[in-house]
Image (tube, rainbow, N blue to C red):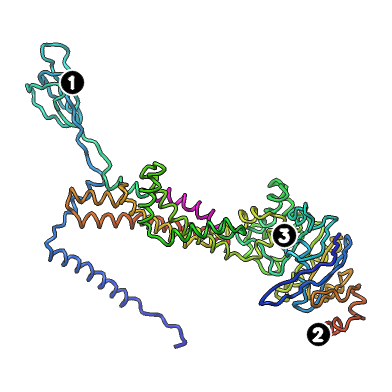
Amino acid sequence: MIEVRNLIKTFEGRGQVVRAVDDVSTQVAKGEVVVIIGPSGSGKSTFLRCLNGLEEFNDGQVIIDGIDLTGSKTNLNAVRREVGMVFQHFNLFPHKTVLENVTLAQRVVRKRGPTEANEKAMNLLTKVGIAEKANEYPSRLSGGQQQRVAIARALAMDPKVMLFDEPTSALDPEMVGEVLDVMKQLAREGMTMAVVTHEMGFAREVADRVMFMDAGRILEDAPPARFFTAPKEPRAQAFLKQVL
Amino acid sequence: MPLKRRTAQRPWQGLLAVILLGLAASLWYATQRIHYEWRWERVPQYFAYRAEVAQDAPVPGQVSALTAEGRFNRIVITPEGGGQPVAVMAEKAQVKVGDAVAENDTVGVNFEWRVGPLAQGLWVTIWISFVSGFIGLAIGLITGLCRISKNPTLRGLAIIYIELIRGTPLLVQIFIFYFFIGTVLNLDRIVAGVGALALFVGAYTAEIIRAGIQSIAKGQTEAARSLGMNATQTMIHIVLPQAFKRVLPPLAGQFISLIKDSSLVSVIAITDLTKSGREIITSSFATFEIWFTVALLYLLVTAVLSQLLFWLERRFARSD
C-alpha cells in the first residue's frame, strides 16, 4: 500500500544542512499498522508528512497504492484524497461547526451531495462517539473530542491509508484513552495505518511493526513483541530504557 | 498595590462633564468675540425645501372666476374674443377676478418638496464611498493574493502598486487620475474620482488582507490540503473566511477613512458633501453652521458604518 524508496529530505538553516530523513526505504502492506517511534528531532514526523506530499522531499520515491507521488503526471490532490492525516494539534477548521468540518471536503473534493455528506458525517461522528456535538464549534470541545472529530473528518474521505502525527501528544492525559480507543477500533477494522506516537502501550498492543527512527534513519523495524523485549540497536535500547 | 480596587467613577465623570461644558462655553465666547451671528434656521432648507412651481395661463384672456377647492384654487380664464373658458389649478393664486392675463403669464404657484444640496451632496458622498470601497476591496483582495504569490511577476507588480499608492498623497493621485488618465482615456469626472479612491483604498486593503492571510496558522492549510483540497479551494473555504474575520476591525477603519477621504474628490468638481457645503456657503454666508453641519453628517455616516461593522464582527465571533 505504501512503498518508500531511498527517501531523502533535508532542511537548510543557518548554513547547516540537516538530513531530516536520510535515505529511508520501507514498505507498509495493506491493513498493516506501523508505529514509528524515536526521540524528538529524529525525523519521524517529517517522514510521515512526506508520505502524503505535505513535505516536499529532495530525493527518492513514495508510492501510495501504486501511484508515485513524484511522477510528473501525478495529481497530488487526487493522491491525498486517499491518504487521511491526523495532526498533533487537530487543525480543525474553527469557523465551521463539527458537522461542517466533516462534510466540507466530502462536498468540495468528493463532490457529494449535502444529504449523502451529512449522513456519512453523522455515521462517522457516531462511530467516534461525538454525534451529539455535531452542531457545536470546535472551540467548545475538549482536546480529546476535537481529535476524534479530526479522525472522523479524515475518514469521511474514505481513505485507503491513515497517517497519525503524534495524535495524543497535545492532549491532557485523561483524554488520551478516548482517542487511542478510536484508533484501536480502526486498526481492528483493517485500516492501513502509519502512526507516529510516544504511546508505547498503543504500539505494543496494536502495531504489527514498530519502526525506531533516529537521525533520519530507520534503525530498527520489528514486530512489537521482539522490539520491546529484545531490541538489537544500542540507540533503541537506550531510548526504551528512558521511556519505559 | 496587589489588591484590585475599584476606581471611584462619579468624580471623574463629573470632571468630564465640566471639561465638555467648558469647551462649549469657550466656543460660544469665541464666536461672541468675533461678533458672529448664528443663523441655524438657514440650515434646514439645504436638506429639503418647498419649491414654487409656476402655473401659467394657457391662453390670453381675463380671469372670470376664482374658487377654492381643497388646498387648490380654481382659476378660470375666459379667452379673449370668446370660446370655452379654461381652468388652471394652483395652490396659491396670484391673480384676482377681472385681471387680464397674457399667454404664459403666471397666474399662481404650486409647492413641491425638493431635495436640497446638502442631502444631494450627502448621497453623492455615500454612493461614491460605497462603490469605490467595493471596487477597492476587490482590488485589495486580488493584490493581497498576488503579494503572497510565489510568482515573481505578480508579487513584483503588487509591491510596486502598493508602494506607489502608499507613498503619494491621495490629492495628487486624484489630480493625476483626472487630468492625465482621465484625459487620455476620456473619463467622466465621477469615474475618475471613484477610480482614484478605489485604487487608493485597494492598496491599503491589500496589505491588510495579506497580513490576515499570513496570520492564519499553517496547520489550517495543511489540514485542508491533506483532505485533497487544492490551493484555490483551501483559500476560498478555509483561509479567506478566517482571515476576513480577523481583519474586519482594520478593514472597518480603512473604510471609515475612505468616507472621509472621499471629500477630496470635491477638487475635481464632483458635488459631494464637502463641495455642496462650499457652494452653500457662497450663497448663504452661514459659514460656521454649514461646516459644522457637514462635519456632523460625515460623523453620522461613519458612526453608522462603524456600528454596522461592529455588529458584523460580533456575528462572526459566534465560533470563538
Q: Range of the magenta residues?
A: B127-145
Labels 1 & 3 near each other (Cβ < 8 A): no
The kind of residue tagged 1 is Pro
Classify residue B58 as left or right of residue B193: left
Q: Nearer the viewer, mark 1 or mark 3?
A: 3
Report the disc number at residue B185.
none
Query: Helix, strand or loop at disc 1?
Result: loop
In three-dimensional space, the C-alpha distance between marks 2 and 3, rounded to whole angstroms, equals 33 Å
Residue B289 in the image: x percent, y percent?
21, 56
Q: Tell me: residue B203, above or below residue B48.
A: below
Q: Which mark is residue B226?
A: 3
Does B193 sit above or below residue A125?
A: above
Quadrant of the image occupied by residue B239: bottom right
Q: Residues within 10 Å of mark 1 (few under 14, many from 20)?
A: some
Does the magenta-highlighted stretch encompass residue B130? yes
Decide which of tag 1 and tag 3 comes sooner along the chain: 1
The residue that mark 1 highlights is B58
State the image quarter where residue A225 is shown. bottom right
Q: What mark, if any, has residue A242 been given in the picture? A: 2
B101 left or right of B253 in image: left
The residue sitting at 88% across, 65% down in the picture is A27
Residue B157, percent from left and from top: 53, 56
The residue type indicated by label 2 comes to Gln
Quadrant in the picture for the C terminus of chain B = bottom right
- Cα distance, mark 1 to mark 3? 82 Å
Chain to which the residue tagged by mark 2 belongs: A
Q: Residues within 10 Å of mark 2 (few under 14, many from 20)?
A: few
Q: Residue at x 14, y 60 (%)?
A: B36
